Amino acid sequence: MKKQLYTKKGTGKEIARLLGVSEHTVSEAIRGKSDTDTARKIRMMAVRNYGAIKLYPYELEEE
């Protein structure tokens, strides 16, 4: 299942700074290319705190 998001410009850079990960890691998570615990946390943060839009409907994992 694809877990791709649409975010505003600069969102990935901000999330990367807050979580202490690379922008590449955030980009891979937002594009749905990775499905690790960190990727799930990034997607959840993007949707809840930055208004990211899910391009394909899916359930967010609760932590």
Image (spheres, rainbow, N blue to C red):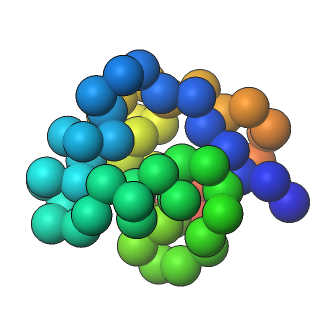
Give coordinates of residue 55: x percent, y percent.
Answer: 74, 32
Side (left or right) of 58 relative to 32: right
- The residue at 61%/70% (across/down) is 34
Residue 63 appearing in the image: no
Give coordinates of residue 7: x percent, y percent.
Answer: 48, 27
Give coordinates of residue 63: x percent, y percent.
Answer: 42, 69
Give coordinates of residue 46: x percent, y percent.
Answer: 41, 40
User: In the displayed image of the protein, which residue is found farthest to the front?
Assistant: 24
- The residue at 24%/42% (across/down) is 13
Above/below status of 49 relative to 34: above
Q: Quadrant of residue 51?
A: top left
Side (left or right) of 19 relative to 29: left
Question: Which sits in the foreground, 43 or 62?
Answer: 43
User: In the displayed image of the protein, which residue is found farthest to the right?
Assistant: 1
Side (left or right) of 53 relative to 58: left
Above/below status of 15 relative to 63: above
